[in-house]
Image (cartoon, rainbow, N blue to C red):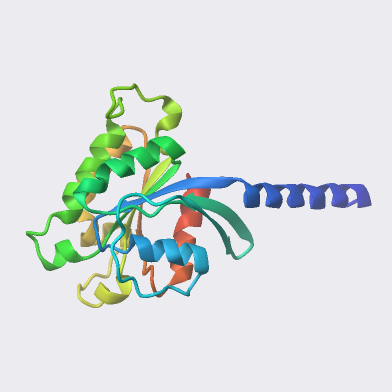
Amino acid sequence: MSLMTGFAILMGELVLGTYKKLHAINFGVYGSTMVGKTTMQHQLRTRGEVPQIKHRTVGRERATRKYLKLDESAYTIRSADIGGEAIYWKEWVKDMKLRKVKYIIFMIDHRHMENKSNLDHQVAWKYLVDTICSDIWPNGKKKKAKEYPLAIGLWANKYDIWKDKYEYDGKIERHPIFEPFKYGMQQLNDKGIPTHKYIMSAKSEPEMVYRGVFTMIKNY
């Protein structure tokens, strides 16, 4: 390799690294209340130093930038903390539309496994899927092709709490925790939007969180 070629490669890497640091990729993080969205926002920002969350998020907070670095890769993402109660679901849609969200993470936990009559996740998931698959926004404006997300992640949080409660030796993507959401994922796939299943612990395993984000960006 010539000196000039090596210099050109080095400069290219520096430019790419600077671009990734300055150019933020918009993520939308949604899900039912108490699922761990606020915890994950802290984890993305601080990597490991997550405080005890004592208050529920009210409404939609301002989106903030997070610079993530894992192994030899780095990205800057922008995400907002938004309440999970049904009265705030319209804020999810507003967040998607205003920030032109490219990737969506819908967080669940194991509450529907512990109590079959608890439909918190399923109802919120249906609302999100119906909204995304619709050709129009709630205000009646037709969606443009670039306004659909590139991919949607269905992330099962609190793995450190529930992993030993349910016996399962198969592949992660076939874990029964994802079963109630299968139809919605098929709807998204039929719309041309790929889906990504993932299991993680937002509070105790920062690398799991980072690796999930990087997987979505690199694969989709």
Q: Residue furthest right?
A: 3
Q: Residue furthest bottom?
A: 164
Residue drawn at x 28%, y 65% as measured from the top left: 170
The quarter of the picture where residue 162 lies is bottom left
Comparing 104 with 80, the one in front is: 80
Comparing 73 with 43, the one in front is: 43
The quarter of the picture where residue 118 lies is bottom left
Q: Decide if residue 58 is on the left or right side of residue 77.
A: left
Residue 92 visible to an observer of this rendering:
yes
Horizontal and vertical percent for residue 4? 91, 48
Residue drawn at x 32%, y 62% as measured from the top left: 172
Q: Residue furthest left?
A: 117
Residue drawn at x 53%, y 46% as measured from the top left: 25
Residue 134 vs 173, above or below: the answer is above
Horizontal and vertical percent for residue 177? 22, 61
Residue 183 vs 118, above or below: the answer is above
Q: Decide if residue 128 is on the left or right side of residue 61.
A: left
Horizontal and vertical percent for residue 142? 34, 21
Horizontal and vertical percent for residue 83? 29, 54
